[in-house]
Image: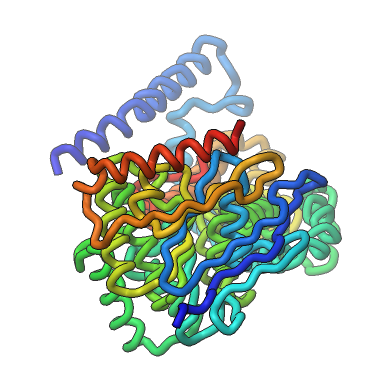
Amino acid sequence: MTPPIVIETCAASMSYAGQTVLSGVDLRCAAGEFVSLLGPSGCGKSTLLRMAAGLEQPTSGSVRIGAGGRSLDSEGTDATSFVFQDPNLLPWRDVWHNVALPLEIEGMDRKEQRRRIADSLRLVGLHEADARKYPHALSGGMRMRASLARALVTRPSILLLDEPFAALDDMLRTQLNEELLALWQRENWTVLFVTHNIAEAVFLSNRIVVLGGKPSRCVAEIEVPLPHPRDRTLRGSAEFARLTAEVSASLFEASA
Amino acid sequence: MNDRIRHALIVSIPPLVTLLAMIVLWHLAVIVFQMPPYLVPTPKRVGVVLLQEAGPLARATWLSGRAALCGFAISLGLGTSVAIVFSQSALVRRSLYPYAIFLQTVPIVAIAPLIINWLGPGFWGVVVVSTIISLFPIVASTTAGLTTVPSGLVDLFRLHRANRIQRLFKLQLPHAVPALINGARASSGLAVVGSIVGEFFAGYSVDEPGLGMIITHSSSLLKTDLLFAAMILSALLGVMIFGTVSLLTMLTLRRWYGGVADPNA
């Protein structure tokens, strides 16, 4: 049995002030897939992700998310979470209460909230002591972990990530990539991941969708048949280098 | 602890030296230019009056301070409420904001007599004048704080389908706190001005004058030393209220922003 399609855009287009940013994008993600959207800056990959999240409406075409076509706020197994490029933490709340926010809005019972928050913090590797810190006292990596914990606290089955590690240094990015991938394997999420970093896309994804051109559309789809579990030694392998070169070539072709 | 004492000294010594220098200059100026006491009294005379009239002056400072605090508190409550209404609808904001600016630009001396006609002389007339003069900074800066939430945070609340009330209390109001406090700082000084000016017109009674009344009376009687004493006390009153608000600011914001007094700066 093939897994159901949980994210689907049909001929989705987007224009701002008469300028077409995205033109006729068809994208399909099956349940459990890890798909990266790769493209040069300003190609509209974030816009596509925001459309999937319901933050923006396509000018034409359609966007569907969740197996039953349910939208982002729906309860149950198709819940979707979004991770921003900026950690977007509320400066007046400590980590614990930042993570609590989605549950508070939902109006969840306090006791259940505490359990979920503790689980979520553990998942992203934040300790009890970190949870009492305010965002200004955290490093960039810790802030991103807190942001991730907030996204996971609703127990989503679909994760939309908008260049979450773009502002971090290389070492930290590599480490968080591995942690994210390990979580994905364990939790069986469907992930749509926006990035402009080729190595990151290859390392994480089952499939890479390359956006490019003016206006942007899907210019290539590249399967990444690397076996799981993946770790950092993979980055030195010949297969990894071949895939990186292939993605890089299609990216340059797209921007040419 | 040692560091804190050192810091306190570094902060407090230069202004104290300035103060001393000014008093000395003042004293010398009076002597050198042979100024008559009804124009400029010596600092010593002012000091003597401050001591001689300590009781009535303290009473007057309390009366003016009470009216200023009351006006400031009303401004704080009313200003924040108005800002909340403004933040909820662009239409309401566009319709009413020009009239809020009117509060800021109308010369208070032009409408104070009218207010006294309506409310009669005494405490409440003074409070209303103080409120009118101190309201606008709070409305303006709180409205700005409520309506300039970073778009990423607005998106976050949209993603989780927060309703209007949740957005107001969990996002807009906390985000507006630094702006509100900045407005409150400006407004606290104005509230003192308002209560003094209000007394020029409204007063309480000759038996129970506030600082504003003492200023007008002593001025008309050419009791310039008493005028100076009242002036100094009104300035101190303003500084005290402003200082208290600033202190509260620091205590609140340190927790959120690690001691950055104004995160928007």
The x, y position of residue A206, in whole percent, is: 40, 59
The x, y position of residue B155, in whole percent, is: 58, 62
Rendering quarter of residue A62: bottom right
Q: Residue at x 46, y 48 (%)?
A: A195
Out of B255 and A52, give the one closest to the viewer: A52
Q: Is residue B54 above or below residue A246?
A: below
The x, y position of residue B7, in whole percent, is: 25, 35
Apparent side of residue B92 relative to residue B143 in the rendered image (left or right): right
Q: Residue at x 75, y 49 (%)?
A: A16
Residue B210 is at least partly visible in this image: no
Query: From the image, which quarter does the N terminus of chain A lie in?
Result: bottom left
Apparent side of residue A23 relative to residue A229 in the rendered image (left or right): right
Residue B114 is at least partly visible in this image: yes
Apparent side of residue A113 relative to residue B112 in the rendered image (left or right): left
Q: Residue at x 52, y 40 (%)?
A: A250
Q: Is residue A196 above or below residue B142?
A: above
Hey, which residue is sitting farthest top in the picture?
B32
Out of B85 and A224, give the one closest to the viewer: A224
The x, y position of residue A56, in whole percent, is: 67, 62
Query: From the image, which quarter does the C terminus of chain A lie in?
Result: top right
Rendering quarter of residue B63: bottom right
Q: Residue at x 30, y 72 (%)?
A: A120
Rendering quarter of residue A253: top right
